[in-house]
Amino acid sequence: MPFTVITLSKTSASLRGDLSKWMQEISTGVYVGNFNRRIREKLWERVKENVGNGEATISYAAQNEIGYRFESYNTSRQMIELEGIPLVFLPQMEEKSGYPKQKGFSNASKFHKARKFSKSTPSAPLSYIILDIETTGLEPNKDKIIEIAAMKIKGQEKEVFHHLIAERTVPMQIQKLTGISQRKIDEEGIDENEVLIDLLQFIENQVIVGYNINFDISFINKQLKKMGQENLSNPILDLRTIVKKENMFLKNYQLQTVLLSYGIDKKVPHRALGDVELIAELISKVNKFPTYLKKKAR
């Protein structure tokens, strides 16, 4: 959910009460909060209906060139868009002397505009790997991997890697949780060493993304060590860490809770490939993900 800031020059008691249900007033007339688009739109309508002749501005995170959008009400500044970039427009005003003020863009707007057009060619989309595993338990030293899935993403292109692991005894509670039966492992499983060698070729040196990804990496590195291979040295990006910074007030950060908070009403299947697909959908909703990915991909 995007971080939102609302600033008001005048605030009635009733409007302050409505805003305080969803936001914190960190300074006089300055409110901050985290909530979804539907709530943001309703609060903004409430502000416009009750601010009277006062001024109001709303700013919130967005997936665009500058990472945010803004709107204003009863102010001289207007928001216009240039190739997806929100810019501040100052309408022409008459001075007391009768000479018109110069109209145009603010210095910040000119900077963003210049930066946009200084790029001779658009940058290629960054590629990354989403990784997830299912295991017989939570301890890398005694439990085993039973399923591995990965998805390679570059722009709109997607490539999938998925295998069950052979020669595993699957506890009944894990069978109930994942739906992976012992028979399925026996019939469809592949040797773990072979799967991991193929996985290394699939992920190459790209950024690996996951939800609580250190859990998955610890199991994989444990087996790589047994095989005489080096640990994974790829850049690692934990989506859960990003979500905690972007959405600070959730009751917990289990994947199911986080999905619902971002408007994804789907049940976590606890299957490696199904979880990877849900993580990919969640990534598309997390505003800060592209910024963190660019840092890791350097």
Image: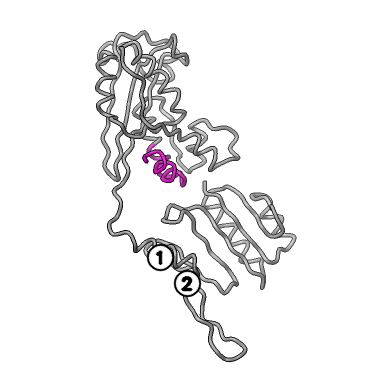
Whether tag 2 and tag 1 are in contact, CB under 8 A, the answer is yes
Identify which residue is drawn at 49% across, 38% down.
242
Q: Secondary structure at mark 1?
A: helix
Above or below, comparing residue 48 to residue 169 in the picture: below
* Residue 51 position in % (x across, y down): 66, 67
> Residue 283 colored magenta?
yes
The answer to whether residue 206 is left or right of residue 2 is left
Quickly name the residue at label 2. Answer: 105
The answer to whether residue 172 is left or right of residue 155 is right
Identify which residue is drawn at 39% across, 30% down.
275
Above or below, comparing residue 70 to residue 235 in the picture: below
> In front here: 127 or 60?
127
Q: Furthest residue to the bottom?
A: 98
> In front here: 257 or 121?
121
Q: Furthest residue to the right?
A: 13
Which contiguous range is marked in magenta? 280-298
Above or below, comparing residue 263 to residue 95 in the picture: above
* Residue 234 position in % (x across, y down): 36, 29
Q: Amino acid at mark 2?
A: Phe
- Location of the C terminus (image quadrant): top left
* Location of residue 248 by image quarter: top right
> In front here: 53 or 246?
246
Quickly name the residue at label 1. Answer: 113
* Residue 135 position in % (x across, y down): 40, 17
**Majority secondary structure in the magenta region:** helix
* Residue 2 position in % (x across, y down): 52, 49
Q: Secondary structure at mark 2?
A: strand
> Residue 60 colored magenta?
no
* Location of residue 274 by image quarter: top left
Q: Looking at the image, tell me whether mark 2 or mark 1 is earlier in sequence order.
A: 2
Q: Amino acid at mark 1?
A: Lys
The answer to whether residue 104 is left or right of residue 22 is left
